[in-house]
Image (cartoon, rainbow, N blue to C red):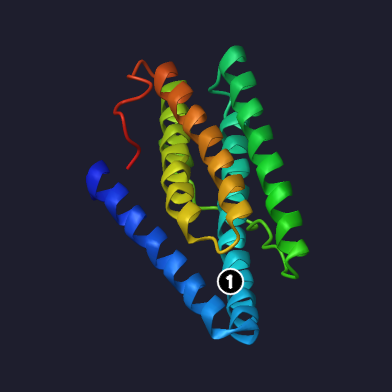
Amino acid sequence: MPNPLSARRLFLGQSSLVLSGAAVALLAGKHALAAKSDDAAAKDTQILNTALAAELEAIAAYQLGAESNLLQKPTLDLALTFQGHHKEHADLLAKTVEKFGGKPVAAKAKYSFPAEKLKSQADVLQFAATLEQGAVSAYLGAVPLFGNRDLSKAAASILGDEAMHWAILRQALGQVPVPSAYVA
């Protein structure tokens, strides 16, 4: 895993490549720009569907935690709040995929969660925290990949929400909520 400084350098390097590609397309004329735009929209739709699949998995994971009977009332309420956020994310992502002319992915009939390892509230919280950490990393990786910069802004907004979920879950586990100055 790259350190935060090299990750920022990698991000900045990728950003300049995107700008250079756009500049070349503009210089090549309208047809090249239109083709690049269509390719970018297809790529953006694929990224959106990947994010949607992850949000649907998170909804199912929080449902598993809620139905486990391992969560005490305030923690259960928090888990259901976070599940509601993931439902809002999924709804927005699905609508955006449709707006781009794509077909939103559907939730799986069954997910492979480690249900047999969830024996306490702490186990459920750690499972959720691990999923939220993965979501933060996934959105962090997706933000610079969007051809449509408005989608990058939306993904960054969701990333912020996922990071808050992760921090709150870490705190509930008695861990340092924000373990470092950078998300890797």
Where residue 184 appears, x then y in whole percent?
32, 43
106 displayed left or right of 132: right
Residue at (58% x, 78% y) in the render: 36
- Identify which residue, 40 or 164, lies in the foreground: 40
Measured as percent of width and height from the top left, residue 131 is found at 46, 41
Q: Which residue is drawn at 63% across and 70% down?
A: 41
Residue 157 point in image, percent of width and height: 58, 39
Relative to 15, does residue 132 appear above or below in the rendering? above
The answer to whether residue 22 of the structure is visible from this angle is yes
Near mark 1 (Cα within 10 A), the count class, few <14, some 14-19 or many ≥20, is: some
Q: Is mark 1 on a helix, strand or loop?
A: helix
Residue where numbered disc 1 is placed: 40
Closer to the camera in the image, 5 or 165: 5
Q: Which residue shows up at 65% across the image and 57% down it?
A: 109
The residue that appears at 52% across and 40% down in the rendered structure is 159
Location of residue 47 by image quarter: bottom right
Quarter holding residue 77? top right
Residue 32: horizontal and vertical position, in percent? 58, 84
Q: Amino acid under label 1?
A: Ala
